[in-house]
Image (tube, helix red, strand yellow):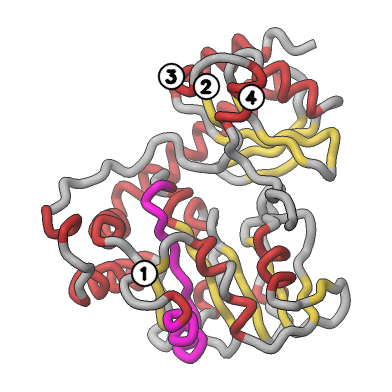
Amino acid sequence: MPGPRDHGGGVDAAAARHGGTRAEWTDLSTGINPNPYPVPALPDSAWTDLPDAGAQDALIAAARAFWAVPEGAAILAAPGASALIARIPALARAGNVHIPKPTYNEHAAAFAAHGWHETDGRADARVIVHPNNPDGRWYTSDDLTAPLMVIDESFADVAPHQSLVGFSDRAGRIVLKSFGKFWGLAGVRLGFAIGPPDLIDRLAGMLGPWPVSGPALAIGATALADTEWAAETRTELNETAARLDALMGRAGARIAGGTALFRLYEVENAAHWQDALARHRIWTRVFPWSDRLIRLGLPPAADFAKLEHALCHIS
């Protein structure tokens, strides 16, 4: 059996290695908004009843409005974008897939599990992570070059004008959205696939009935309708990212990319930086394919002093 794939997170393992309780750690290894959307009070029925069509319709309507989804595109809510990533390769007969690297590795794993082969040449399917994780690269409509296109916009809500969702009504185009990143509620497990009705209907059949919990339906519908919160959050995230860049720059790191939810830095020895910060109970992300790149999510405001103190001890 293959081993676990490289991801952010893993604070429990970091604490076991470096010490401290889970509560003492600041997890900067992911790209999740440190100031999450305030969860509204939920009716008892959200917990006790099977999710009804009305709650599902309300969520889909809010999603369509928030992302300006074309009228001809359909939307499917799922228990996280990962659940969709695992199933999308089954929508077409296995062939060659192009996935520009480095990027989020679950896409390659999902296509491989369905018998697809990766290629750098002409492909039957292509995956673009838009903006890319970890370097923040944005793509354009010129990059939609394969019969089956997967456009992973898990981090795109920081800059909605860059979204390619306007192409989601075209044949073979599927746009993925993640609720956990921008709204900071990864534990809700909510994601969306947006695309032509034929593909979305097939994905829905793979998920089965009631794929999204009642609480997730209610929280998602409320959050997606709160455009004022979204606008204020984009401003706050950009300001926090700039503050983090300045702090890391003073410590000797060089910006190498990222988004307003995570920053990628080049340093002389990424493993050394990760270990040095871990000694101060701060967990970051390094990569098996680079010894010079380290990625940090945005710290909560209260943890900036902790990070600044830890950076003073890197030598």
Residue 104 drawn above or below residue 123: above
Residue shown at the point (72%, 25%) measured from the top left:
274
Give percent across and percent down for residue 59: 28, 67
Whichever of callouts 2 and 3 sits on the residue coming sooner in the sequence is 2
**Quadrant the C terminus occupies:** top right
Residue wearing tag 2: 25
Q: CA distance from mark 2 to mark 1?
A: 33 Å
Q: CA distance from mark 1 to mark 3?
A: 36 Å
Whichever of callouts 1 and 4 sits on the residue coming sooner in the sequence is 1
The amino acid beneath tag 2 is Trp
Residue wearing tag 1: 211
Residue range highlighted in magenta: 187-205
Residue wearing tag 4: 246
SS for callout 4:
helix
Q: What residue occupies the far front of the structure in this picture?
A: 1
Tag nearer the camera, 1 or 4: 1
Residue wearing tag 3: 302
